[in-house]
Amino acid sequence: MATKAYILIKVKAGKTKDVVQALKRLPGVEQAHSCFGRPDIIMFISTQDERSLSDVVITKIHSIEGVEETDTHIVAET
């Protein structure tokens, strides 16, 4: 069963647009939106399992230039 999650992302000033574009290119990303206030970006992703989700967050999202912090919320029920 797929693991779905909302990921709240804080980025460096002036990098939001670039980060959103990079996020939308990642496999499994269903939505990525810049927001006013905190967080800077909210995204929704679907991955194969929690291990895959962890890999995306740690190795892909955190390697995008401008990303400072992430806060991951795994969906409990759909």
Image (spheres, rainbow, N blue to C red):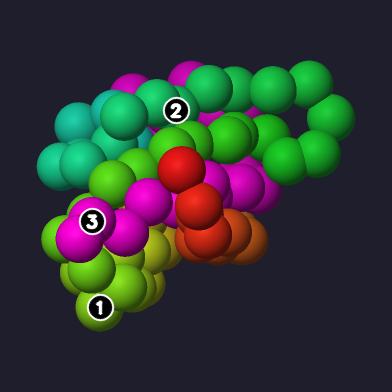
Magenta segment includes 7:
yes
Rendered image: mark on residue 2: 3
Q: Position of residue 65 (x, y in %)?
A: 40, 49
Furthest-front residue in view?
77
The structure residue drawn at horizontal position 37% and vertical position 64%, both measured from the top left corner, is: 57
The structure residue drawn at horizontal position 53% and vertical position 22%, both measured from the top left corner, is: 33
Answer yes or no: is residue 2 visible.
yes
> Label 2, on which residue?
32
The crowding category of the residue bearing disc 3, from other C-alpha atoms within 10 Å (few below 14, some 14 to 19, many at least 20), is few
Local secondary structure at mark 3:
loop
Residues shaded magenta: 1-21
User: What type is the residue that disc 3 sits on?
Assistant: Ala
Q: Quadrant of residue 20?
A: top left
Local secondary structure at mark 2:
strand
Front disc: 2 or 1: 1
Disc 2 to disc 3, C-alpha distance: 19 Å
Image label count: 3
Which quadrant would the N terminus be assigned to in this image? bottom left
Q: Are marks 1 and 3 in contact (CB under 8 Å)?
A: no
**Is 74 rendered above or below residue 5?**
below
Magenta segment includes 3:
yes
**Is 29 rendered above or below residue 64?**
above
> Label 1, on which residue?
51
Mark with earlier residue (2, 3): 3
The crowding category of the residue bearing disc 2, from other C-alpha atoms within 10 Å (few below 14, some 14 to 19, many at least 20), is many
Instruction: Tell me if 50 is positioned left or right of 38 in this view.
Output: left
